Amino acid sequence: MSTPDESGRTVSDTELSGSDPSGTELTGSDAGTPDESGPDASSADETSRRNDVSSIKDRQRAAARARLEKEMAERATAARKRRRNRAVIGSALAVVVIAGVAFVLVNTLKSDEEAGDPTVAAAGTVSCNWTPADESTGGKVKDVGMPPATVPNTGTSTLTFDTNLGKISATIDLAKAPCTGASFKHLAEAKFLDNTKCHRLVNEDTFKVLQCGDPFASGKGYRETDGTGGPGYTMAEENLPTGSAKPYPAGSIAMANTGQPGSTGSQFFICSEDTQLSPNYTLLGTITSGLDIVKDVVKAGDDGAFDASAGGGHPKKELDIKTMTVS
């Protein structure tokens, strides 16, 4: 008879009882051989043999159970890590759920309405669709209007964060991420992220990311609402990784979302190391200088505030964005 364990593995009576694979019990003696010492001695020997068999079976059952419990614990740990990896990109509040884990948190001001993909306009430009967002989903909105409907899709832009720890610069390829690049230019001109800070850090073996981009995350200390803010619009994802063993390499700046198509807003994450994530997040740009600043923040660790939900916590070493510019 077989019984399934909690992990779905089938454990047979043979494994738990201590029988050998052929079904013969491990008796420790040759069955059927008479004892020459007389009835009493034979009875005593038989009792001793049974006790030995029982002891062997007990030990084998205990060993089998220990192996099973260890295997189940290892599988549970691996499952937790997989769930957490899928949920890297959320905000601190479980307002939305990504891949079934309370933690795709991120720009939780999103609309359920899906933003359309960019459409080709005149040569050298592309049309972008901006979907209005409001606070009905539980997030916070800082309304600074919407970017232009038609934007350049050639050339590059330079994204610069002037922070309390030094300058971080990145290149945006407008041929690959024209709408997201235009959005950041619009937000920079509106001083949308000036005097804000990076509110979340995840520091695990397979991914190390610093999350920023909430216009309401500012000042000393952290609040429960940090990580729920964004602009008055969302956009479609673009420039998603394809066919790469390293979808988000070290130095990547990628856009956070709620796990739903068209939910990209202003929140982004910086990968301090090669990061394994599902290719569902827009690659905005690549850091050209200042990655060492991000690495130092990640190395300093987090306070574990989100361990029970999203994973990670607030950075112990604060990174404050004094100004953001796009040129």
Image (spheres, grey):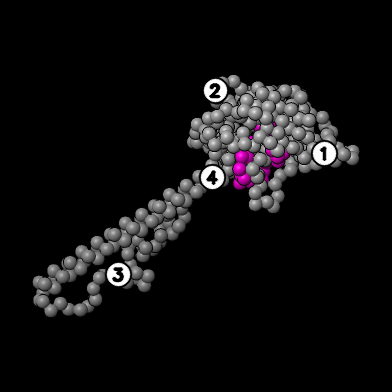
Residue bounds of the magenta highlight: 264-287
* Nearest to viewer (mark 2 / mark 1): 1
> Can you say which quadrant of the picture contains the C terminus?
top right
Question: CA separation, marks 2 and 3?
Answer: 66 Å
Mark nearer the N terminus (2 vs 1): 1
Q: Nearer the viewer, residue 290 or 230?
A: 290
* Residue occupied by mark 3: 25
Going by the numbered disc 4, the residue's amino acid type is: Asp
For label 2, count other residues whose C-alpha is less than 10 Å away and answer few (under 14), some (14-19) or many (20+). few
Question: CA separation, marks 2 and 1?
Answer: 39 Å
Question: CA separation, marks 2 and 4?
Answer: 27 Å
Going by the numbered disc 3, the residue's amino acid type is: Glu
Magenta stretch, overall SS = loop
Question: CA separation, marks 3 and 1?
Answer: 77 Å
Question: Secondary structure beneath disc 3?
Answer: loop
* Mark seen at residue 155: 1
Question: CA separation, marks 1 and 4?
Answer: 35 Å
Whether label 2 touches label 1, CB < 8 Å: no
* Residue occupied by mark 2: 221
Q: Residue at x 23, y 73 (%)?
A: 29
Q: Is residue 215 visible?
A: no
